[in-house]
Amino acid sequence: MTGRGWFRATAAAAALTLAIGGCAGPTSGGGSEAASNPDDWGEAKGTVQFWDTNANPALTKKWEKLIGDFNAANPDIKVEYVGLPNSSYLQKVDNALASGEIPDVMLIGNDVAHLIAQNALVKLDDAYETSALTSKVDATMIANERRNSADAKLYKAPLSALSDVIWYRTDWLKQKSLAEPKSYDEFFSIAQQLTEKDKNRFGFAFRGGPGSMPPMFAMTYGQAGIGKFFTDDGKATFNDPEAVKALERYAGLYGTVSAPADLSNDYAKIVAAFDGGSAWATHHNLGSTQDHFKALGPANVAGVQPFPNADGVITATAPAISGLGILAKSEKKAAAWKFVEFMSTTANSEWCEAVGQVPANTEAAKASWVQQSQPLKAIVETSKNPKTQYLQLPTYLPDWSKILKTEMEADFQQLLQKKLTAQAFADKYAARFEAAKKEYDESLKAGK
């Protein structure tokens, strides 16, 4: 199965768990109809400011190289790079929208609905059709993006798909004559066995700081074996007894097989701990693939998908889509679109190889590096398992990012410090998600 074939399988499975109500009804989010017509975007020239919302030294270097290639091929356009750390970029974007000091184009992940709700992004449907990108970009990625907007329009040009990954050191296992884990019980047991606090060696690098919610959801639902975030009648499954039990077990990794300082760990810190040799395992996604391979060597690290639960069911969160959005108030939309086209075609394979993610471009997805990547092979095998189900997180909710980043993260730290129980945490946010979904559903019915 090719990278493209894998994604089609996973996206189809994920779509079964998504209940948006058929994407019916208009929405107040997104750019204006006039702004969505490429004929109104002016000439493709001038300076374009690009915000990378997942900046780190290695990826910044790659962006600068690709931007240099683009600028050389398009002498009438100059793309300026601005790197923002993922842990704080959303607040900076909100501030920019409020002040009017916006970029022209921006890298966007699961926060797209938050931006659509603020009329921040231009619709890209017409641009896709007139540029023939529709035939070059994986159709399921485009379909997945349309589900993030109530009007079923496209506000983000897909560049890549990234899955959550459990990373662990295979060389540590060999040193202790331990077999690779095949279940959550084995994983937790090995993490305990490999923890040697007096030697500053821990079983797990825990993400307790910014960005802590994606691994929490993945580990909670993966253990619980629950494939829907909402039941058919709109009830959140986050406080299902099995989910609460799994959440408690995952949170229990902190302080027992992880370092106390992990309470504030963000992406950079868990990668540093894992790659630096102080942790056997961690949970992230495909985005850190090259970091691990460069630091440890591909032979010494494995990136695996969720383990089966006691019933043999594998529950993985549906792949997230990373892509580029053009700001509705940009005065350089035509030039920004040229950069989007470049990243979706010429540069797509090189960019995706750098981040270790599945390319959106169907030709790039056939590249040899895709076929040879161990973490991608694991994703393929998981997608072929008849007992695999994909949990679609409700990223279409306008409040999704706000709930996770400004509400849940702080309370999660309270949970880790045993100042809040897993049951109380789950109950609070199950109710919060239900309220957000109800508000969203009512806005669709009202045609807002």
Image (cartoon, rainbow, N blue to C red):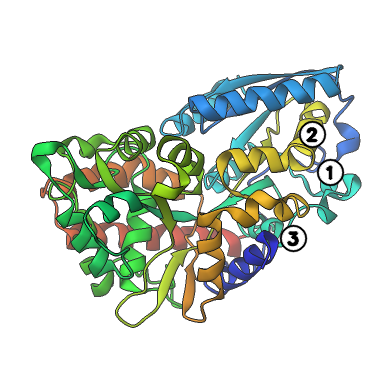
At mark 1, the secondary structure is helix
Quadrant in the rendering for residue 70: top right
Instruction: Please tell me which residue lies in front, 406 or 319.
Output: 319
Q: Is residue 247 left or right of residue 260?
A: right
Q: Which dot marks residue 309?
A: none
What residue lies at 73% left-to-right and 55% top-to-bottom? Answer: 366
N-terminal of the two: label 1 or label 3?
1
Q: Is residue 38 above or below residue 400?
A: above
Q: Is residue 164 above or below residue 309?
A: above
Residue 389, position as x, y percentages in the image? 48, 74
Instruction: Please tell me which residue lies in front, 305 or 199.
Output: 199
Residue that numbered label 1 is attached to: 127
Residue 270, position as x, y percentages in the image? 33, 39
Quadrant in the rendering for residue 342: top right
Q: Is residue 436 left or right of residue 182?
A: right
Q: Is residue 132 left or right of residue 359?
A: right
What residue lies at 76% left-to-right and 53% top-to-bottom? Answer: 137
Give the number of the mark in front: 3 or 2. 3
Q: Is residue 331 left or right of residue 158?
A: right
What residue lies at 56% left-to-right and 48% top-to-bottom? Answer: 113
Residue that numbered label 3 is attached to: 139
N-terminal of the two: label 1 or label 2?
1
Q: Is residue 172 above or below residue 383?
A: above
Farthest residue to the left: give it: 198
Quarter of the picture holding the N terminus: bottom right
Residue that numbered label 2 is attached to: 337
* Residue type beneath disc 1: Ala
The CA distance from mark 1 to mark 2 is 8 Å
Residue 106, position as x, y percentages in the image? 63, 32
